[in-house]
Image (cartoon, rainbow, N blue to C red):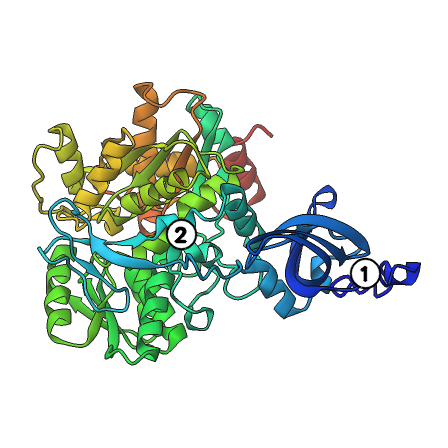
Amino acid sequence: GRLCGDQSCERKKGREEAMRPVRDMDAWAYEKQCGFVFGGGRADVFELKGGRSRSWAKCSFGGRIETGLARRGSVLRMTLAPTQSLWSLSDDEKRRWMQLPVNDRSPLSAKYVAFDRDNDDSEYSLDEVVYRAKNGGLLEVQHDMEALAQRSPAEWKEIFDRRSARTVWPYGSGVWSKKEWVLPGVPDKDVVSMFEGNSNLFWAERFGRELGMTELWVKQCGNSHTGSFKDLGMTALVSQVNHMRRKGANIKAVGCASTGDTSAALAAYCAAAGIPSIVFLPADKVTTAQLVQPISNGSTVISMDTDFDGCMKLIQEIVEEHPIYLANSMNSLRLEGQKTVSLEIAQQFDWEVPDWIVIPGGNLGNVYALYKGFNMMKQLGLTDRLPRVCVAQASNANPLYRAYKSGYENFEPVTAEKTLASAIQIGDPVSVHRAIRALKATNGVVEEATEEELMDASARADLTGMFNCPHTGVALAALIKLREQNIIAPDDRTVVISTAHGLKFTDSKVAYHERKLHQCSSKYANDVIRIPAKVGKVVDALRSRIDI
């Protein structure tokens, strides 16, 4: 009665004695028939039977008497009368509705461990400033899977669905709606979020039909605050830095080397948190749209006459000697945010896993992040399988593709040549061994695309209603090749990861349609018709394109 506002309940029916409360206890409630899922109120337990740790309780709640199995410190589930709606709850009640009850016996936690656990047993707190394991290898964030497994798959699905796209801080974010699986140790007050994520899963019906596919989808990660998937990782990293600084860590700024999108995300999230940011950019290798973002957000922008790999080497030397926190994907915190793309995809398919994921690959951290998300869901029982993964690389920067063709026997960095897919113009990817692990675990493949292939694929897909960045063009070109080889079957549910918004790469699109790209015939170019302002000329021009 306290939650639904009906103070009468059963008391006014002459059952005062039977209703005499034994104790108050926290209660959750849901009404399946009406599709409501909410709670966080209090219920009077008027009958309690059983032992110390396990009891049957009858409660007066929402005008009904309900029976449920109660455990000490656990949630009691009851039915709520359908007169109560989410909008009528207070902000505090909504927040409690979205929070899991604290389990003191199995608290959730995460830590850094060596990626190569077979040869390195080093471990570190997430509050430490550390980027490499004891033996010099990469680190990864390891969650206490036993503690996470204390909740059933149904409970995790319910709490994730409950939070999705709401406005309650910070759970409305696509990343922080999965907070317990990302960074459980960061308090809500330290989270730096712009409600990133929750990007649309676009059914590319027309383009799929052209390829003979019934289930082609595009995950539009570029529909985000700074226009790329990098927001998902940066909210996690900057939130952890914000938490560390508030605890007294000597971090004066956060820095990164970037091909454009990472710097934009870092600058925005640091600006929101009031933390200085520094970005190293390769001169003349990022678009104007990418460059103006960190400038606008107040970053210290340093342009250098080198490529991304050169910028990366320099930033690593700088952070070793100065209190600047490294934000590149060598830092595994970002992967924790980026892995939520996998959870979102499964959630958008009603917790079913697609057959294929096709993703463009540069520094390759995102490849491992996606695998990690799908693998966590499988380990915790939310799903029952992994998708196959295709990593798509530009031919001008394809070290992973070359390693794949040799059976991963050896990996050799390359000097990346200029590519219109500038964000993946990386010849010595930091996360190559992470990506290889993901590919082996998913029976994955690697494909490449030439400059002409990636621009033609992007333009062809644009003609069906999309507006793709060149990197998504690389993934679409790889998809076309896999369909031609029938590696991807007509009915395979396939998700292409679109990593950035096409509006950040308008220069290359304009050049394509004006047929000004070197070594590109612009097969799908849409020429602008330039004619005098006369009706007859206009009609003739229209008739050359449309049957009128």
Question: Picture coordinates of residue 546 (x, y %)?
Answer: 54, 31
The picture quadrant where one finds residue 136 is bottom left
Query: Is mark 1 in CB contact (under 8 Å) with mark 2?
Result: no
Question: Picture coordinates of residue 184 (x, y %)?
Answer: 40, 61
The picture quadrant where one finds residue 374 is top left
Q: Amino acid at mark 1?
A: Met
Residue assigned mark 2? 147
Asked if 231 appears above or below 485 in the picture, the reply is below
Disc 1 or disc 2, which is closer to the eye? 1
- Looking at the figure, which quarter contains the N terminus? bottom right
Near mark 2 (Cα within 10 A), the count class, few <14, some 14-19 or many ≥20, is: some
Q: Secondary structure at mark 2?
A: helix
Residue assigned mark 1? 19
In the drawing, does residue 66 fall left or right of residue 167?
Answer: right
Q: Secondary structure at mark 1?
A: loop
In the drawing, does residue 84 fall left or right of residue 509?
Answer: right
**Label located before the other in sequence (1 or 2):** 1
Which residue sits furthest front? Answer: 51
Q: Amino acid at mark 2?
A: Ala
Q: Is residue 530 visible?
A: no
